[in-house]
Image (cartoon, rainbow, N blue to C red):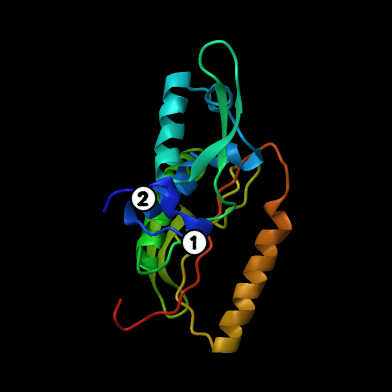
């Protein structure tokens, strides 16, 4: 399905699968993030994103054709006028019949999970004292764990070591407990989300009920 023209994005409602996928990809790649602060000319976009002007102009024309960007203002001068472009809406609604929700989740999660895996692998290489991994099949402990020595599961602590937490679990919860856990996880995330420390950390939270069809 071809990308829809600007005139077919009334009230920010996306009706083209191609436009929908492009928008979700842009969220992951931050391609449109520069426009969150206001209108930009191609030269201003190029300066902010550190790319050649011709590439910034190509990007703008792509999004203008899809109706995501529009001409905000035009400054006349000798030669070509300077046009500044802005988002055509503050948000864009994608109906599930245009792009199924599972497709949205996949587009967002796959590249982020790949990057997260790469960061975890790099952090583990910097951990001194890890001797390997150990598979436990005990009644009280089951799974594969990083160990500092046979039988000694690494708890993530240590002086001058990367701060790393990696947890996977299947939990037996009531509906009320699952709701409470989700609320607590959201509260912890919100507590630290706006900190401005010198190191960037990646965090992936996901809690989902098991289904018989998975």
Q: Which residue is mark 1?
A: 93
Q: Earlier in the sequence, mark 1 or mark 2?
A: 2
| Depth check, front residue: 135 or 58 | 58
Q: Is 4 positioned to the left or the right of 92 in the image?
A: left
Q: Quadrant location of the N terminus?
A: bottom left
Q: Which element is circle 2 on?
A: loop
Is the residue 9 above or below the residue 173 in the image?
above
The residue sitting at 57% across, 53% down in the picture is 156
The residue sitting at 56% across, 81% down in the picture is 178
Name which quarter of the figure residue 210 lies in: bottom left
Q: Farthest residue to the top: give it.
A: 78
| Depth check, front residue: 129 or 174 | 174
x, y percentage for residue 186?
A: 64, 67
Q: Is residue 117 visible?
A: no
Q: Which element is circle 1 on?
A: loop
x, y percentage for residue 154?
A: 53, 56
Q: Which residue is mark 2?
A: 4
The residue sitting at 41% across, 76% down in the picture is 138
Q: Is residue 178 visible?
A: yes
């Amino acid at each position: 399905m071809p990308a829809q023209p600007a005139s077919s994005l009334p009230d920010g409602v996306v009706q083209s699968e191609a436009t929908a996928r492009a928008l979700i990809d842009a969220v992951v790649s931050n391609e449109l993030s520069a426009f969150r602060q206001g209108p930009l000319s191609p030269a201003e976009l190029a300066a902010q994103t550190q790319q050649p002007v011709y590439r910034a102009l190509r990007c703008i024309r792509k999004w203008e054709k899809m109706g995501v960007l529009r001409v905000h203002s035009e400054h006349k001068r000798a030669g070509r006028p300077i046009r500044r472009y802005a988002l055509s809406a503050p948000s864009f609604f994608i109906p599930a019949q245009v792009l199924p929700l599972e497709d949205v989740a996949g587009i967002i999660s796959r590249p982020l999970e790949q990057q997260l895996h790469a960061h975890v692998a790099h952090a583990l290489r910097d951990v001194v004292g890890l001797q390997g991994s150990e598979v436990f099949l005990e009644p009280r402990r089951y799974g594969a764990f990083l160990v500092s020595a046979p039988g000694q599961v690494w708890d993530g602590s240590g002086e001058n070591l990367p701060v790393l937490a990696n947890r996977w679990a299947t939990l037996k919860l009531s509906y009320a407990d699952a709701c409470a856990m989700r609320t607590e996880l959201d509260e912890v995330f919100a507590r630290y989300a706006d900190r401005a420390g010198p190191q960037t950390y990646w965090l992936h939270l996901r809690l989902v009920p098991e289904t018989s069809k998975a």
